[in-house]
Amino acid sequence: MVNPNRLDALRQSQLAAELSDEQCSVLSELVALRELKNGEILVREGETDNHLYAIVQGLLRVVKNAGTADEITFFTISAGDFADELSFMDGTRHYASLAAVGDTRVLGLEREKLESLLTARPDIVYKVMRAIIRAVHQIQRRLSMQSRITSTSSMGGIDRHA
């Protein structure tokens, strides 16, 4: 039976961008909905995690040395964004922790659960992977734009990429 809370959360996420109602119902049975409190760590620096997270509500800080005097927040990610895309894909250790800012809700999709659909429902796997690639491309574009702006300002207004 379809859990309406998970289904609604999934429909609000980028994961469902190309999914039909029926595909959303199937995928909603594989995701977990987590409620995090302020400061709660979703993923710890140095650990591996096989989940893709879609932020449904709230914010996550990407933080190095969480909970220490040397703590540094690199950036925050907000509702609608993915977290942990690359570790989901390749299983590498996290360079930073993901910590909730205020009350935060995330959907978690375990890599093995998505892979379980490869034979029976490759259409869903394909569309989820497209959503992940779109998100990674958005990040790459933002980084390229930031790099371009930084390069231009450091060269006194000369655009060295032109």
Image (spheres, rainbow, N blue to C red):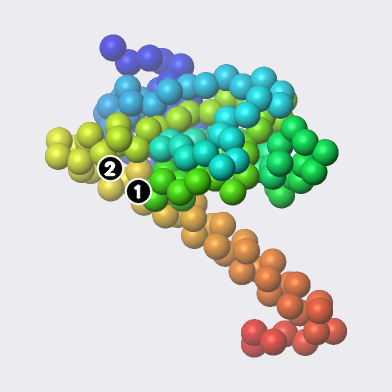
Determine the residue positioned at 56% across, 34% down. Answer: 43
Q: Are marks 2 and 1 in contact (CB under 8 Å)?
A: yes
Left or right side of 61 for 11:
left
Dot 1 surroundings within 10 Å: few (below 14), some, or many (20 or more)? some
Residue indicated by mark 1: 129
Task: Please identify the quarter of the rendering in which residue 140 is found.
Answer: bottom right
Determine the residue positioned at 23% across, 34% down. Answer: 116
Q: Quadrant of the C terminus?
A: bottom right
Determine the residue positioned at 66% across, 33% down. Answer: 99
Residue indicated by mark 2: 125
Separation of residues labelled 2 and 1 (CA atoms):
6 Å
Q: Position of residue 8 (x, y in %)?
A: 45, 23
Q: Position of residue 152 (x, y in %)?
A: 76, 79
Left or right side of 132 for 157:
right
Q: Position of residue 110 (x, y in %)?
A: 37, 33
Relative to the observer, which residue lies in front, 38 or 29?
38
The amino acid marked with disc number 2 is Val
